[in-house]
Image (cartoon, grey):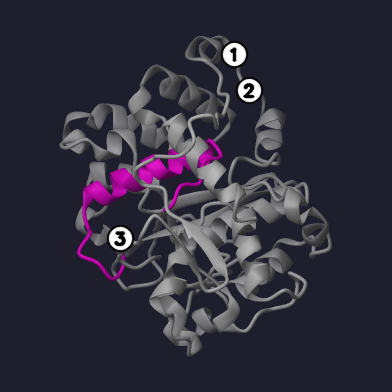
Amino acid sequence: MQPQEGTPPDSERVGGCAVRRVDTILLPPAVTILLPSASMQRTLRLMTHDELLAYYTAPGPFTTLDPFAEQVDALPSDVGGIAKVVQGLLIHEALAPAYQVTLPPERREEKQLHSASAMLGCATRLDNRPLAERRPPDRRVVGVCRHFATLFAACLRRKGIPARARCGFANYFQPGKNVDHWVGEYWNAVEQRWILVDAQVDELQARIFKPDFHLLDVPRTRFLVAGDAWAMCRSGAADPMTFGVGGTDNWGLIEVFGDLLLDLAALQNIELLPWGWYGLAKEDGACETEAELIDRLAQLSSGADAAALEELRQITAADPRLAVPPETLAAIVAAEQQLV
């Protein structure tokens, strides 16, 4: 769940945190991220389930916590405990008034942070107490749902628990609406299943939204990963105009399409900002002209298992429109390394 976005400057210090927004990339070309070539990806053997879990236990570009390893290691190791820590470090921009917080314009720019390390760097500059100590709402890092999900997944990975951020739609914020949202997802080894967790909704928000389920085990009928949402809209099981971004006029199938590309990137350990659409999602008319391809991509988002991830890698290698531009990713990583 996130508000409509403005167009902030490329870089400035806001509150206690320096933030650099990366839209048009004009950063050092010497920074590179090495990725497998398309031919290498096509010849990879199929991933096993254990390898899938290992993949989601290792940190990605935005989920490494090395600069804060000692502090994160001291945090609780249970899923609920990590969710509470995240809630004590972050505040959702659109929900700040519920916490009696008025955000100055410069503090709102904190939502442009991508990486978990940059979030924690900002958190410690705002309040240098141990991470486990809950901050007053006005000294929490400003973000949106994606920040809660990404930091939650990063902390679980540091604890050795396979986890990932998922982009899709929640139907527990507005009656009759499927609101653009991000949640965390972790592998429960005892139950042998992936479990969705809404790390954003704390006790105060629960009193506002009144969810009728456990927030540490969100039913997949209440949060639809983007692939499921696309399939429902395409089949006629759901009205596309009920899917969109809360607080904006952005509703319809195009929003589902955009979230699908974001979810596919997140499945590949690249948790972009909710407004960071890329490639095919930015092509005019692609939602209609590429419907067959998007149908297949939606199935991969819905499946999200080892076979789906391997096919996603191969499809992405063969079609550059489906890949986050490496230069964009490298630039974001380089910019945020300066903020830790």
Q: Relative to 30, is 36 above or below?
A: above
Which amino acid type corresponds to the residue marked 1 in the rendered image?
Leu
Stretch of the chain drawn in magenta: 245-273
Q: Residue at x 67, y 71 (%)?
A: 84
Q: Quickly name the residue at label 3.
A: 7
The Cα–Cα distance between marks 1 and 3, rounded to whole angstroms, is: 41 Å
Residue 177 tag number: none
Badge 1 crowding class, 10 Å Cα cut-off, few under 14, some 14 to 19, many 20 or more, is: few
> Any magenta on residue 211?
no
User: Mark 1 or 2, which is nearer the eye?
Assistant: 1
Residue 44 tag number: 1
Task: Please indicate whether residue 273 sits to the left or right of residue 257 in the image.
Answer: right
Q: Position of residue 14 (x, y in %)?
A: 49, 69
Quarter of the rendering occupied by the N terminus: bottom left
Quarter of the rendering occupied by the C terminus: bottom right
Task: Please indicate whether residue 242 sits to the left or right of residue 137 in the image.
Answer: left
Which amino acid type corresponds to the residue marked 3 in the rendered image?
Thr
User: Disc 1 or 3, which lies upstream in sequence?
Assistant: 3
Q: Quickly name the residue at label 2.
A: 47
User: Mark 2 or 3, which is nearer the eye?
Assistant: 3
The Cα–Cα distance between marks 1 and 2, rounded to whole angstroms, is: 8 Å
